[in-house]
């Protein structure tokens, strides 16, 4: 795939995406988390790129929501879903679901939505999702005690790219390689020509090192898993709570992660712990050993009477001898016991094994008081313990890194599956919260594609009332229709319901209704009510918009668009277009627009208070539906929210006059009521 062929992806974005391991797969899958790992690509930008790639894959021209109000309805629908996500990833991932007229695209999402509706958004699963995030790649891994060496320039560049965590050096001969051996703890030579050389230091010849980065830099996988340990554990919990099939054995993953500390080191190894403690406690243990020896000698001296004859004292003075000679002569056995006791303490305190011989030289054999350490022996012991600790740590790191490197792909799948589950659970919660069903969409799954829609028991979650309090609406239109009704009777909310159900259906998602059938729509044109009349210029611009709309409908006329992947009809929803100008002219204009749309087999609903005038102005028979008022009860208007087919709605003034006529004895109100007939 040419990354720049994706709509909206330029040279710089393509270069950033190219740094991913498999950008083509991420684009095809709509994998927002992976795309967002590209340098400079935010999750929001990644969602837009993924959406564009999906459109390109399905030859989807976009522009389904053709007006600002239609786009608002899509945004509202998307918002209802996003409110039910737990992770930021799922919120952005849902943005790759958009309304489309392409049957294959609609069906792809429908398959996932059906599976999602079977899921149970259990509280324990939702809680576990709180800790799941896309895996992060640590950027601060740098190893300074190792280097790679090669004599080949191309190999040098390859090594720099493959293992950037370590320094790469160019060497010409064994002498330069030996110099590196003195500067670095470990040197990995990449050239086979260096094999067999006897070079001082830890110099290894590994021509295949670039194929096994974890062997050279075990810190890489260790840092990755340390950085993402909590996310992986949360993802594992999600799989357990949701009873999902995991890509790896979760117990093995848990036990492996338990051996890793937060800094990328290995823990849980008794030998490494022993050596680490020995290095850390060495000085304190040596000081305590000195005290043990001195305390023993002090007690021995205090308990013994030492008699020195005059000739012996003179001899000692003449020879310049001191207390050491006296100790050797009079307390030799006690000194030996004190030294042995001190050495045993040092060995026991540090739990020494292989380095016991060096440790015993820390307390010297030569009698002296106070007993003092042999600093050279202490340094030697520290070096050997440190080397043993580091060698043990390196071996453990390599072993653990090898295990973790093999788990990387499964770990990524584990987190990806958990994040995608959040997307599905958002759909499941949406469907459950709003009593949704999967609608039938014309041209999808072999359904017929007659113009119009039929919604039974539809309830809009966009109203400013609790969803349980929303009255269900039954409404269907075959072609185009006028929708009349009393003020505050629910005409606009019915239009919103039609727009929402149509939008969700073309997103491939369930709709808030008992059942719904929607013809395949190429574009949704929803025009909200205009506030106030328009001046001449604005009025002309509005007419031009409707003229272009009517002319554009020809592309979908005369069939179901089955031979056109972007086929389908135009749906036009208009709320009180008469507000743009004088009532008489508005009725004529609306009648003309409806006739043109009907001729072109469009689907449309026009809400208007001028339904009677529009019918009179039309040259063809128009369908008019009415949201009927059932009467006034205690001054409150009672309305049947479901439009009645083929009936012009009675107005609120007519209902009030009717009530007065029923209550009054005179003929005035009865005569006035007759004027409405």
Image (spheres, rainbow, N blue to C red):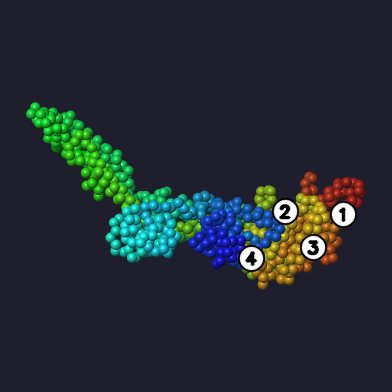
- Mark in the foreground, 3 or 4: 4
Residues packed near mark 2 inside 10 Å, few (<14), some (14 to 19) or many (20 plus)? some
Q: Which circle marks residue 60 in the picture?
A: 4
Quadrant in the picture for residue 603: bottom right
Q: Which residue is mark 1?
A: 676
Instruction: Using the rendered image of the protein, determine whether residue 115 is visible from the camera's viewpoint.
Output: no
The location of residue 340, given as percent across then percent down, is 19, 40
Question: Nearest the camera: 435 or 450?
Answer: 450
Residue name at image x 29 percent, y 56 percent: 200
Circles 3 and 1, Cβ within 8 Å, touching? The answer is no
Q: Earlier in the sequence, mark 3 or mark 4?
A: 4
Q: Residue furthest left?
A: 311
Residue name at image x 63 percent, y 55 percent: 78
Residues packed near mark 1 inside 10 Å, few (<14), some (14 to 19) or many (20 plus)? few
Q: Which residue is mark 3?
A: 593
- Mark in the foreground, 3 or 1: 3
Residue name at image x 12 percent, y 35 percent: 329
Q: Earlier in the sequence, mark 4 or mark 2?
A: 4
Helix, strand or loop for disc 4: loop
The location of residue 227, given as percent across then percent down, is 45, 51
Helix, strand or loop for disc 1: loop
Q: Give the CA separation, mark 3 to mark 4.
A: 28 Å
Q: Which circle marks residue 493 in the picture?
A: 2
């Amino acid at each position: 795939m040419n990354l720049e062929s994706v709509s909206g992806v330029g040279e710089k974005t393509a270069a950033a995406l190219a740094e991913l391991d498999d950008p083509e797969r991420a684009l095809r899958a709509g994998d927002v988390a992976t795309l967002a790992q590209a340098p400079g690509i935010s999750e929001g930008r990644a969602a837009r790129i993924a959406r564009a790639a999906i459109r390109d894959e399905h030859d989807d021209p976009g522009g389904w929501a053709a007006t600002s109000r239609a786009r608002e309805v899509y945004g509202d629908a998307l918002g209802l879903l996003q409110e039910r996500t737990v992770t930021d990833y799922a919120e952005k991932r849902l943005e790759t679901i958009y309304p489309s007229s392409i049957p294959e695209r609609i069906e792809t999402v429908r398959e996932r939505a059906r599976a999602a509706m079977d899921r149970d958004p259990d509280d324990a699963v939702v809680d576990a999702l709180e800790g799941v995030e896309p895996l992060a790649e640590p950027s601060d891994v740098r190893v300074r005690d190792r280097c790679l060496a090669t004599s080949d320039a191309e190999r040098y560049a390859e090594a720099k790219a493959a293992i950037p965590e370590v320094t790469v050096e160019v060497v010409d001969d064994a002498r330069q390689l030996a110099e590196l051996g003195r500067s670095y703890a470990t040197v990995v030579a990449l050239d086979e020509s260096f094999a067999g050389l006897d070079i001082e230091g830890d110099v290894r010849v590994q021509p295949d090192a670039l194929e096994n980065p974890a062997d050279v830099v075990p810190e890489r996988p260790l840092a990755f898993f340390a950085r993402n340990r909590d996310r992986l554990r949360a993802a594992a919990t999600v799989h357990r709570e949701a009873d999902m099939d995991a890509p790896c054995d979760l117990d093995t993953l848990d036990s492996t992660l338990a051996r890793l500390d937060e800094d990328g080191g290995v823990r849980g190894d008794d030998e490494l712990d022993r050596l680490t403690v020995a290095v850390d406690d060495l000085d304190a243990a040596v000081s305590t050993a000195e005290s043990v020896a001195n305390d023993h000698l002090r007690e021995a001296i205090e308990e013994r009477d030492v008699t020195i004859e005059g000739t012996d004292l003179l001899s000692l003075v003449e020879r310049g001898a001191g207390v050491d000679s006296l100790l050797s002569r009079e307390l030799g056995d006690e000194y030996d016991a004190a030294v042995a006791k001190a050495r045993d303490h040092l060995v026991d305190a540090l739990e020494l094994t292989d380095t016991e011989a060096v440790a015993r030289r820390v307390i010297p054999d030569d009698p002296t008081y106070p007993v003092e350490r042999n600093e050279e022996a202490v340094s030697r012991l520290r070096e050997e313990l440190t080397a043993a600790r580091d060698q043990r740590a390196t071996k453990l790191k390599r072993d653990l890194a090898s295990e973790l490197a093999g788990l990387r792909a499964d770990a990524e799948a584990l987190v990806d599956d958990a994040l995608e589950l959040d997307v599905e659970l958002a759909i499941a919660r949406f469907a459950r919260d709003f009593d949704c069903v999967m609608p039938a969409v014309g041209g999808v799954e072999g359904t017929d594609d007659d113009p119009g829609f039929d919604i039974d028991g539809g309830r809009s979650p966009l109203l400013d009332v609790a969803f349980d309090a929303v009255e269900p609406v039954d409404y269907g239109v075959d072609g185009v229709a006028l929708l009349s009704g009393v003020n505050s009777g629910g005409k606009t909310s019915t239009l919103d319901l039609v727009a929402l159900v149509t939008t969700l259906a073309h997103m491939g998602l369930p709709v808030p209704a008992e059942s719904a059938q929607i013809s395949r729509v190429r574009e949704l044109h929803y025009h909200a009510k205009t506030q106030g009349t328009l001046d001449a210029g604005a009025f002309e611009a509005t007419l031009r918009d409707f003229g272009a709309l009517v002319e554009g409908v020809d592309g979908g006329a005369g069939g179901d668009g089955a031979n056109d992947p972007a086929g389908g009809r135009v749906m036009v929803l208009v709320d009180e277009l008469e507000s743009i100008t004088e009532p008489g002219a508005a009725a004529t204009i609306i009648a003309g627009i409806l006739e043109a749309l009907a001729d072109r087999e469009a689907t449309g609903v026009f809400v208007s208070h001028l339904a009677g005038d529009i019918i009179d102005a039309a040259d063809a028979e128009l369908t008019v539906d009415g949201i009927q008022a059932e009467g006034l009860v205690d001054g409150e208007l009672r309305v049947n929210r479901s439009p009645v087919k083929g009936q012009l709605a009675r107005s609120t003034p007519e209902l009030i006059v009717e009530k007065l006529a029923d209550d009054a004895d005179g003929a005035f109100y009865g005569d006035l009521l007759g004027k409405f007939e």
